Every structure is written in C-alpha cells, then in structure tokens.
Amino acid sequence: MFVVDFENLKKVVINPVILDQHQPKTKVPSKRSKLLEGCLSLPNYYSPIRRGNYIKIKYLDIDGKEVIEDFHNFNAQVIQHEIDHLNGVLFVDHVLKQNSPLYKFSGDDWEEVDL
C-alpha cells in the first residue's frame, strides 16, 4: 500500500498490479527532461532515472473497491517508483542498472557522487 498526492488529489493504492506500461525507448534520459528522481529513503540524492511515461494499474482503494487507472508522464513515474518500493527496489538500484549519474544536494551545491 502507498499514498500519492497528485495536484491535491490523494490516492490510497492497495495491492497494485501492473496491467500495462510503456518502457523507455532510449538508453539515456532525453535532454528535454530535467527531472531528477529522488527518494525519501535516501534524502538529498537524485538521479535522472529512465522510466516509461505510461502505466495502467489495477488496485484497491481505501474502501476496498477495485480500480483500474491509467497514469501518464510524471504521475506514471511516481506510481512506478512506489510500486518498486513494494517490490523491494530502490531508485539507486535503477541508478546502478542504468549507469546513471547520482547527485547529492547539500545546501546550495550539487555534487556528483560515485556508488
């Protein structure tokens, strides 16, 4: 189970099952993409993780009602990140697998760090 807050709309997602998802098509994030993924499990560390821009999941809501829902772009990335947590995968696992740079933010400074 996890809770997400999309544009002030909170969702409780219980036992999500991925029904469909798009995989990233390139080996590196697009130059247009400035999004660095981070995680509260590892505060102040960020990386440009490649994730698909679409995911469809089936889950139970807070009332136990089955919901099938599509998520796109940033929301899809958040859902994939949270499902990873449920499966014991952290974003640094993707950093290693994708050979992505990892940055630490401290004060006003960004520093690339090695894993």
Image: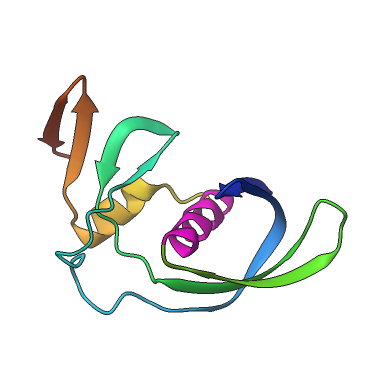
Tag count:
0
Left or right position of 99 against 95:
left
Q: Quadrant of the C terminus?
A: top left
Res 16 → quadrant: bottom right
Q: Give residue 96's position: percent from left, percent from top.
A: 25, 53
Q: Give residue 45's position: percent from left, percent from top.
A: 28, 35
Q: Residue furthest front?
A: 8
Q: Give residue 20's position: percent from left, percent from top.
A: 55, 80
| Relative height, residue 45 to residue 7 (above, below) | above
Left or right position of 71 against 50:
right
Q: What main secondary structure does the magenta stretch of the protein show?
A: helix
Look at 19% across and 68% down and name the residue there: 30
Res 52 → quadrant: bottom left
Left or right position of 106 against 23:
left
Closest to the observer, 72 or 9 = 9
Left or right position of 21 against 23:
right
Q: Residue furthest top?
A: 107
| Relative height, residue 29 to residue 78 (above, below) | below
80 is within the stretch colored magenta = yes
| Stretch in magenta | 74-86
Look at 87% across and 58% down and name the residue there: 64
39 is within the stretch colored magenta = no
Q: Give residue 95's position: percent from left, percent from top.
A: 26, 52
Res 31 → quadrant: bottom left
Look at 14% across and 32% down and name the residue there: 110
Look at 44% across and 34% down and name the residue there: 41
| Relative height, residue 69 to residue 11 (above, below) | below
